[in-house]
Amino acid sequence: TRFRNAKEKLISSSEEGSLELFRQARPSSEGGPTVVGLLEKERQATASLASGQEGDNGEAIRRKRDQLAERISGDRLVAGSDDYFDLSLLDGMTALYEGFKGENALRTAAEERVAQLQAEVTTLVGQNAEQKGEFERRLEELTDDLARVEADRTAYRAERDEAVAQMGRDFENSLGQATAALAEARGKNEELRSGLEELRARFSAQQGKLGVLMAGPSELPTAREPDGTILSAVPGDEAVYINLGEADRLMLGLRFSVFSAGTGIPADGRSKAQVEVVSIAPKSAECRVVHVEPGEIIVEGDLVANPVYDPRRALTFLTVGQFDLDRDGEYDPDGRATIEAMITNWGGEITQELTALTDFIIVGGPPRQPKEVRNATPEQRDRQAAAQRAYDDYLAVVETARALSVPAMSQDIFLSFLGRSSRLAAR
């Protein structure tokens, strides 16, 4: 009975009939192998497969598996690494193999792409070598061209230096001749100047005896001569035609004042209308009607005039003094420049020197004459002296114009002849 109990602790009757291992066992008296021996052999084989160590038991194998799973999870090199804690060794190997297959496929594709790129690089390197050869050939050609250009430039410089040297010699000869001629001309000019001064003195004395005054509107025969006439005009129409054309030095934008043929051009220059040239033909021009005075109309035969314009030549003007174009009681800083711009824009010329050949002088207001300041500082005395010189220069120019009988116009008369008021001119 004791023996039976001991046997049942080792194996039950049902296990004894079903286990192949038990059927292979033999009593130890017969030389075995016993059941225990067979079990130990199987355990060792299983341990060797699982961990490579026959002496490892199940706990040791589990510990090694967990350590490997922790390493896999910590390195983060395998996708889903946290799942390896619950896998058997076989399942873990299977999962690793499947992952390896995917990575291997990617690596294979990458290697194929690298090979493809390497082939492309090889092709590009070959093409680059061809381009380099072409570049070097072209560089050699350009180097030859540059050498030829440099040689040509050297030859040109030699010719130029010789030409400059010859010009210098010619200039010295011409300068000597011109200097001699200039000295002779200066001598003659001095004689003429002396004669002119004498004539001016005599003329000034005669003018003083006659009581010559500054030229006024009644003394402007040139300005009061018409430049042309109206060829065709329809009352109320915005366009008229004048008898001046391309041969008469017309320019687009030139304005004419219109006067009645019956009354002529009045002394104050007031017109009945203003027209502006918009189209020029050989012998006529189309003009736009800019303004017509109330109660007036433009008719055929009316006179047109502009004191700045002359069909034969450019008239010369000298401006002197200061101008108050907007009539605010203060001289405008750019008033003189505005007057001169109106003259040059319409074909006149500005001169800085008053001579007997000057056509008109436009006279503005005089500079303010300085008042004497007691106990003036040196700076104040300098300013007073400069202001007095400017005032004296103004009077000298006006007096010279009187002496030379140069026609003079005030600001308002000049603008009136142009058909413009002071306020319009200021704009």
Image (cartoon, helix red, strand yellow):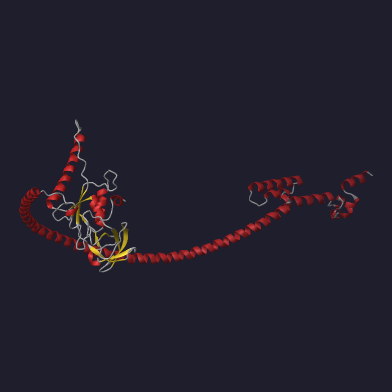
Give the image location of residue 242, x and y in percent.
27, 65
Q: Residue at x 46, y 63 (%)?
A: 125
Closer to the camera in the image, 382 or 414: 414
Q: Which of 16 and 313 is in front in this view?
A: 313
Is 61 displayed left or right of 362 in the figure? Answer: right
Furthest-right residue in this view? 1
Q: How many marks?
A: 0
- In the rendered image, the residue lying farthest to the top is 375
Q: Position of residue 282 (x, y in %)?
A: 26, 69
Residue sitting at x 18%, y 42%: 391
Asked which quadrant contains residue 286, the reply is bottom left
Residue 376 coordinates in the image, percent (x, y): 20, 32
Residue drawn at the location 18% of the way across and 54% of the way down:
218
381 versus 362 height, above or below:
above
Q: Is residue 208 left or right of residue 372?
A: left
Quadrant in the picture for residue 270:
bottom left
Front residue of 218 and 147:
218
Q: Is residue 21 left or right of residue 421?
A: right
Q: Is residue 198 left or right of residue 294?
A: left
Q: Where is residue 427 in the image (x, y as percent from the top left)?
A: 31, 51
Image quadrant containing the N terminus: top right
